Amino acid sequence: MTTLQQTPKDSYAAARREMIARQLLPRGISDARVLRAMGEVPREIFLPAQNRSRAYDDGAQAIGDGQTISQPYVVAWMSELLQAQAHHKTLEIGTGCGYQTAVLCKLVDHVYTIERIARLAEGAQDNLRTLKLSNYSLRVGDGSRGWPELAPFDRILCAAAPAGIPPALVEQLAPGGRLVLPVGPQGRQEMTVVMRDEQGAVNVEQRGPVAFVPLIGG
């Protein structure tokens, strides 16, 4: 009898399936589109080669420059809270290595993403090109200010924690828009959803404690 050797590619595909089964579904992630995106995006390519064996661990991983790639569950949770449909004009603050960007690219027609650190932005570009994703625009800059010349946005996701909700991001939300972000000082951050209704009124909901790197901006 011949025993088939499992290739690294097969191993990572199995790890993605296990991630969904053990980390996402038991914690209540139920949006079929989000689950499909999480199953399609190869998280391992967004990590340094020496750390790829830990790509699907249930935790955040360092990517350099004091930044992290968020825990798989947190990426899925934020994506689900965003309630993004294909036609929604979407802004991401904090591109990092591009993993959350890639998930968003599977959910919406186009992602506008901002990264403060040029080296990380270059690496994210390389990662996204490796996946042959092209439905995004990336700029290097201060994400706390949003992207005013392209506003308003239907959806905004911020992958770093400001001490308070940045007014510029709220101002750039379209009527009916949603902003998902962690808010608060280190050790006391809350996942927060900001919603602007069709009349322009803003409602804020806290969804649970989280731990993110701080959002640095002017």
Image: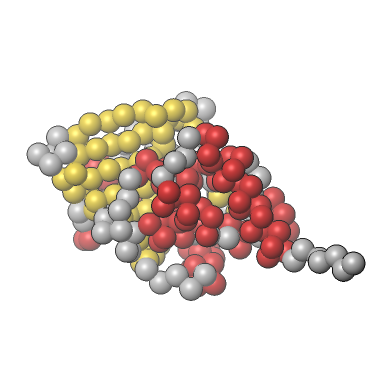
The quadrant in which residue 206 appears is top left
Q: Is residue 188 above or below residue 102?
A: above
Q: Residue at x 29, y 49 (%)?
A: 155
Seen in the image, is 154 located left or right of residue 112? left
Q: Is residue 43 above or below residue 25?
A: below
* Along the viewing direction, whichever of 17 and 56 lies nearer the viewer: 17
Q: Residue at x 36, y 47 (%)?
A: 157
Q: Quadrant of the N terminus?
A: bottom right
Residue 104 can be seen, yes or no: yes
Residue 182 percent location from the top left of the image = 41, 36
Give the residue furthest to the right.
Answer: 1
The quadrant in which residue 185 appears is top left
Residue 171 can be seen, yes or no: no
Q: How is the image coloured?
A: secondary structure
Residue 156 percent location from the top left of the image = 32, 48
Residue 102 percent location from the top left of the image = 46, 60
Q: Residue at x 61, y 51 (%)?
A: 17
* Along the viewing direction, whichever of 52 and 68 lies nearer the viewer: 52
Give the residue furthest to the left.
Answer: 199
Residue 146 percent location from the top left of the image = 30, 52
Seen in the image, is 174 located left or right of residue 134? left
Q: Residue at x 44, y 28 (%)?
A: 208
Label count reads: 0
